Image (cartoon, rainbow, N blue to C red):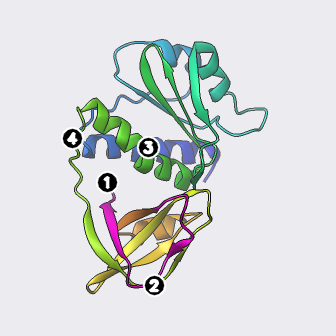
Amino acid sequence: MGRNDIADAIADWLAYAIAADGGEPVATRPGGEVEALLTSGGVDAVAMIGGTGASGRDDTVHALARSGSVEAHGIALLPGETAAFGIANSRPVLLMPGRLDAAVAVWLLIGQAILARLRDGTEPLASSKSTLIGKITSTVGLTELVLVRQVGDGVEPLASKYLPLATLAQADGWTVIPAASEGLPPGARITVCPLP
């Protein structure tokens, strides 16, 4: 997959996830000026893919700083460390990394919360409690998204840190390990959220 293929796949998944969560996605393909997209009207929030890293081509965060404000950049989220959040034209802006697994994690952990807030806090995607089968290890200081799969009466962890596409396809849901935790032992009760 080339860079544009990955960005297109992320954009398609994001549009699906927003619609599945009760939102109305409005997609804009590359070609427009980032600052113009940040300041244009007609939407309640903006989510952009790519341009959040440290390379010379990663200028989306700088465009947000020029067009509004960057409230956080370099979020302690794994995957998704280079994500950014800010405000432009009185709307929330979420800047997601251009890597598929990082964009998925950032949307699930931050984007869904933004969308819920825009809906007055309603949460249409119901979570459930389940028993963990297998151990999850976590890095203290980072909030980690962990993919899980239903196995019998519990769930087993599939992947954290990096989420390969094949693993995303096998997952039934996800859970989050807080930044203060070193992980969870087998038998722990966890909250499992569905994938869109």
Q: Secondary structure at mark 4?
A: loop
Q: Is residue 33 visible?
A: no
**Quarter of the image with the C terminus in it:** bottom left
Q: Secondary structure at mark 2?
A: loop
Circle 3: residue type: Ile
Range shown magenta: 177-196
Instruction: Return the residue at label 2.
Output: 134
Residue 164 is inside the magenta segment = no
Examine the rendered structure and indicate whether residue 11 appears above or below residue 102. Answer: above
Lower sequence index among marks 3 and 1: 3
Write down the quadrant of residue 33 in the picture. top right
How many C-alpha atoms fall within 10 Å of the one at disc 1: few (<14), some, or many (≥20)? some
Q: Which mark is residue 122?
A: 4
Circle 4: residue type: Thr
Circle 1: residue type: Pro
Assess whether mark 1 and mark 3 are in contact (beta carbons under 8 angstroms).
no
Assess whether mark 2 and mark 1 are in contact (beta carbons under 8 angstroms).
no
Pick the front one: 183 or 8: 183
Q: Which mark is residue 196?
A: 1
Q: Which mark is residue 20?
A: none
Write down the quadrant of residue 14 in the picture. top left
Lower sequence index among marks 2 and 3: 3
Instruction: Return the residue at label 3.
Output: 110
